[in-house]
Image (cartoon, rainbow, N blue to C red):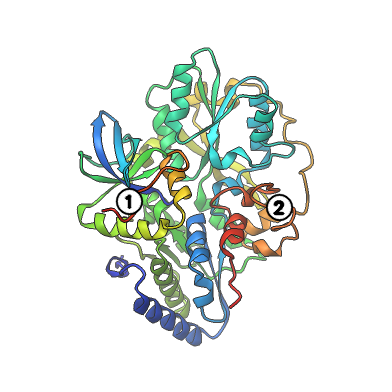
Amino acid sequence: MCLGIPGEITAIDGNEATASFWDVEKSVRLDIVGDEVEVGDYVLNHAGFAIRKIPDAEVEETIEIYESFLEGDEEEALDEIGAEPGRQLGLGGR
Amino acid sequence: MPAAGGETLQFRDPETAEELTDRLEALMADIDEPVTVMHVCGSHEQAIAKYGLRSLLPDGLSVRMGPGCPVCVTNMPEVDEAVALAEDGCVVATYGDMFRVPGTERSLADAKTDGADVRVVYSASEAAEIAREEPDAEVVFFATGFETTAAPTAAVLTDDPPANFSVLSAHKYVPPAMEVVAELPETDIDGFLAAGHAATVTGYGLFEPFVEEYELPVVVGGFEPLDVLLGLERLLEFVRDGEAGLENAYPRCVSEAGNTDALETMWEVFETDSGEWRGIAEIPGADLVLREEYAQFDARERFDVDPDVGGADPLTEDCLCGDIMAGQADPDDCDLFGEECTPQNPVGACMVSSEGPCKIWLEYGGQPDL
């Protein structure tokens, strides 16, 4: 889907970062995020690239919307994150 | 450009949903004739189908999906090119959505079954990584998608990719396709609901020339069900007032200019070219091809793909994918839908991609019969 998926940046090395998506860690490129990103920021990840930094004020609502959207479609969420099928997502765990 | 209030909506707020559907009802009563709205995004279709939004819409308001699934509009000969390169010994890497899409004769999955080296990757950078790790292999990234994936492909190409890496671009650019669909005599569209997240990259200003030229309203909407209803309300207001106009009903994610870094990278690498969108038309300016400066990474320049590839007759003439992408048919108008054509054994791309309307309708039901 072209939805993208929000994740929290947990480590940064140049343009390569690691982000946590409901406890599933994946690498995310920062080449085209178009903003300064620090550890702890949330980004919208699409196909392995952060396409937008989510403003702090919008993080909570964005996560809520996605959790509700992804509920019951966890396989698709894993696909969007790029994680192996069958992983457990910590939805609602925030 | 006024913000339309999208930032104040609460998620899945039943009262707001009821207010919005009441407003839609009242607007349709004022308009007093059928209205067709087209959206151009698989994620919108998912939200609409999953939450049964069509069942909430007033009589006379029809919401159709247009050419909003990049895999679905990828032309079969483009798949054939990828299959031919895989059969010629290249490692072909592509997104999972593309793996089982049939070309005129075969899919990449078929080629893999017969021994070709086809790999599903999650990102363009993963494809480049394969090339780095396997310097003796020619690694071709069969790249699909709209701006949200074209910018990442471009980012990889501007970041010193390995010499054995190349891109077979099937990237698509939506605005010219909207123009073509708006002009199709059989497709009577009163307004467009544009995709919020694609607009995260492109910015909503992208649609300004379209609105002016075609005198149709365009509203950028989010994917949450209430966002969709809000977008429809704004569109109906334009229709009622007989106005064309552009509105951003998704201000919490979308700005006028979009992600300028991503766009600069994309346009540094790609330029537009005329190309066939599967089943719709040859559309000027709607394919994204590599600029000459990046020719060494262009699989079409690097390899002699047989020009006859893709010349065969399609597997079936019965598949309605093209008509569906043009907004002229619904998935259940197709005789193959859910019968010969299923996600396990897809005949057309619309049944393969998670953004494909046929797959979405089969999973959730598209037109709830309540």
Q: Give the vertical position of B6 relative to B43 (above or below).
A: below
The subunit letter for the residue under badge 2 reads B
> Measured from the top left, where is residue A65 in percent x and y?
34, 60
- Nearer to us: label 1 or label 2: 2
The subunit letter for the residue under badge 1 reads B
Q: Label 1's element?
A: loop
Identified by mark 1, the residue type is Ala
Which numbered marker is on residue B341?
A: 2
At horizontal 50% and vertical 87% (from top left) the residue drawn is B29
* Left/right of residue B164 with respect to residue B349 in the rendered view: left
Which residue is at the front of the view, B12 or B59? B12
- Can residue B293 be seen from the camera position used here? no
At horizontal 27% and vertical 69% (from top left) the residue drawn is B8
Which numbered marker is on residue B23?
A: none
Label 2 crowd (10 A; few <14 / some 14-19 / many >=20): many
Which residue is at the front of the view, B215 or B251? B251
* Left/right of residue A29 with respect to residue B117 in the rendered view: left
At horizontal 54% and vertical 86% (from top left) the residue drawn is B32
- Can residue B103 be seen from the camera position used here? yes
